[in-house]
Amino acid sequence: MNGRLNVNFVGCSLIIFILIIYVNIFYECGKKVIYYNVRKRISINDDWRFFKYPSREKADSLVYDLFQFMYKSKKDEIDVAKLAGFKNFNSFQFILKPWVTPTGNEFIKDSSRHYKRPKDNPSSNFPFVLLDYDDSNWEIVDLPHDWAINGPFFTGPNPEVGGSMGRLPSPGVGWYRKKIFIPESDSGKCIFLEIDGAMSYTIVWVNGNVAGGWPYGYASWYLDITKYIKWGDENLIAIRLDNPPNSSRWYPGGGIYRNVWLTKTNPVHVSHWGTFVVTPEVSRDFANVRIEVCIQNDSNREADVYVKTDIHYFDPLRKIVREKVASFKPIEMKILPGSREKIESSTIVEKPKLWGPPPEQYPHQYIAVTTLWEGSKIIDKFETPFGIRHIRFDPDSGIFVNGELVKIKGVNLHHDLGPLGTAFNLRAAERQLEILREMGCNAIRTAHNPPAPELLELTDRLGFLVIDEIFDCWEIGKTTYDFHLIFPEWYEQDLRAFIRRDRNHPSVIIWSIGNEVGEQYTGESGVEIAKRLYRIVKEEDPSRPVTCAMNWAKPYVPLPAVMDVIGLNYQGEGIRQDPEFEGTDKIRTPPQYEPFHKQFPEKVILSTETAASLSSRSVYLFPVTNKVSDFVRDGRGGDSKIRHVNAYELYAADFGASPDKVFASIDRHPFVAGQFVWSGWDYLGEPTPYYESRSSYFGIIDLAGFKKDRFYLYQSKWRPDYPMAHILPHWNWPDRIGKITPVHVFTSGDEAELFLNGKSLGRKKKGRFEYRLRWDSVRYEPGELKVVTYKDGRKWAEDIVRTTGEPYRLIAKADRNKIKADGKDLAFITVRIADEEGYTVPDANNKVNFHIEGPGEIVATANGDPTDFTPFPSKSRKAFNGLVLCIVKSKKGIPGRIKVVAESEGLKKAKVIIEIKN
Ligand code: GAL
């Protein structure tokens, strides 16, 4: 045996691993190696049949649990049951929870609490779960799929779905069906269905058998469906989702909105999420790398296996496994039938290339390739990408990555991708991060749920630091049908699965077990829950600290003491300290950085949420506050008739603060590790302060991806070495001639001179804890505003804003002119309404129509206006303040050229050509 095992099948450099190798004989480095049907992970995203009931009242009753009965009357239940062909109706026969809960057993530590699947198979005659049910009139969809994003929006005073959930039809009951042929040659294999995320209360049937499911819509999970498979035959996978109303404080989306996979392994294989790599000791000279591998024997015979893991340098962009840099000592072991064994081993990587955030560092990655042998055969091969990095949490200065202090310049992100909804798209997520990176952002908090797995692949690759967060509530709910309903039954499974899934990502540096949970208020009983969650995290990953984001808990209440890192939402700056909030029953909190630092001198303090600033891109309302931060009221930063908030970037939610105020409070407390701004991008839902709208005003970047002025304020602070200057407002004010029209400048310089039509309006210097330069008494006259900025006395950067002419033509530009013909890649085309000289007309709202020719489709349009109820797929949309976006997707396997034409009545049209490459 050893003779064969000495074969170093990856000994040659630069080998691309192709995991879909079935009984193949390879000659590598001159030696013979047999791959025996190693694992295959197949995307099964394409070609599903989809059906959603027109209303919950008309839906079937195959619910997860009793609370879902609350949605309708008992009588309806019986009628629907009869219609569906059930004889001897008994409501309990429709509660499928007992068949779903066993799916999570693997994540319940105490095996005496494992759920037993009942013997019978209810609903096996329900038409949708049967192979021969005729679903030809169901919609054909590819996953990831968000069933609600196409709208229409619910408008008006008593909408079915209100502003907080984005006014889109995300609640409801829907089904997905797909037939999959499993060849005879697979018999003897294990077949797993992996679902990266489905919203929500998912129940899966395979060939008429309830195979399991998972309620939490943000969880990634998997099912062993081997026993239901018909080999050499078509197999039907039927999936039912049930998305409750009032289940979320933001737009949750609906449907199977992330990737779905079928994984085939040999019966003896590395378990799902079965590896864990940590780097307990890291220096520039060497790194101690430790791996834990869990091997599972699903066969009915004992197995003698030999496990070997090699570490290679990894190029994540091209998914190329490069040279081998180290190996773990191989281990031989016996695994009893039906059991799992964990092995642990350590090795040294010499002169490691460290993972760290740009621009100072580079996110190098490695990959651990675990090979499992049984006798002469390779029976499994499992890859674990990871990074070598060292993180130190210093309570007096913040977070050190590989010995360098990295102040957290972070943002919160919700999971939706604006006009594309929640259906995960790699390019759309990458674009979000790229624009944030341009601003100088180096960290993301996944508010308030596990993200798509690919988001963390992106943060690994691009070098963002991540707070990976799991829950928005524990036992105390925030909405009627949110996670609190199932918290007691599912928190352990969700938490362990989440950590096992994400713990190898170098970008994840902190686990967050909750956001603003109600248990902040419940003293010791809340703490008991927090401790339970904390213990679970430490059992699954002792290497990272735990936090929870607290908007109320004070240093003297018991909850913060449980956390390793103090996560504060808005408390650092203080909440509602202005006299106008005196006597209200709302949270009022004096600034809390000092008291927390004093109480917990050994803990790092991080602002998990700051700002909650509000603005509508390019909407300037007068008068402008002369304060540094103010709240939105009619006539004071807001206008409830048009539902827009002033873009001078001085306004915030009542509990929040302007970016300027936040910067000052963090700079005054250098021990604070940094901040996560609420929020990086606008998102669907939570349209504070105007709930008649459909998307937020909090974003630094609007829902279409256009930069609000705030972008430049953060850039000026977060990229101090990048010469930039930005003037606001725009300079098209025919009705303001002679009126006071303040001019503000954001710059990474420290001084600036402003000119109006060539005449100096004075040179100003930033004071200590000042982040903008303001000329508050400028009287408007049309023409040109120019700013010349200085840094340390030297010229630094300039910006010019001009009064433009009338809209004359459209100018279109794509973010990329070449995209992949994979049916997923996107081009984001920005169309500007320009005057004759090509300047964007900043208040133009012309309607633009888009046409496409060639192998692509227009999937959505957007303009960043939270009040726009035109459905996102519409090919015709009004510009919002000079800009409109068109999103084009390639078609799978069809290369060629796409031409997109943008037209608007009375204006010269524009076109863009995009190359589609295989
Ligand atoms: C916070 C909350 C976020 C978001 C934000 C802005 O309190 O954690 O989820 O709601 O306020 O309203």
Image: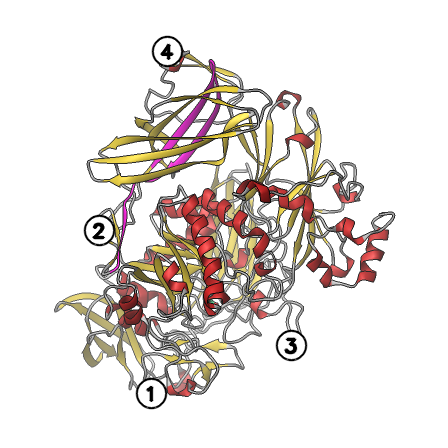
The amino acid on which the numbered mark 4 sits, given as a three-letter code, is: Gly
- Cβ at disc 2 under 8 Å from ligand 1: no
Decide: marks 3, 4 in contact (CB < 8 A)?
no
**Residue marked by disc 1:** 740
Q: Nearer the viewer, residue 803 or 174?
A: 174
Front label number (1 vs 2):
2
Label 1 crowd bin: few (<14), some (14–19), many (20+), radius 10 Å: some
What residue is at 71 percent from the left and 57 percent from the top?
Answer: 66
The CA distance from mark 1 to mark 4 is 81 Å
Q: Is residue 469 visible?
A: no
**Residue marked by disc 4:** 30
The amino acid on which the numbered mark 3 sits, given as a three-letter code, is: Pro
**Residue marked by disc 2:** 404
Please, what secondary structure does the residue beneath circle 2 have?
strand
Front label number (2 vs 4):
2
Indicate the quadrant where residue 233 lies.
top right
Q: Nearer the viewer, residue 371 or 514?
A: 514
Please, what secondary structure does the residue beneath circle 4 have?
loop
The CA distance from mark 1 to mark 3 is 37 Å
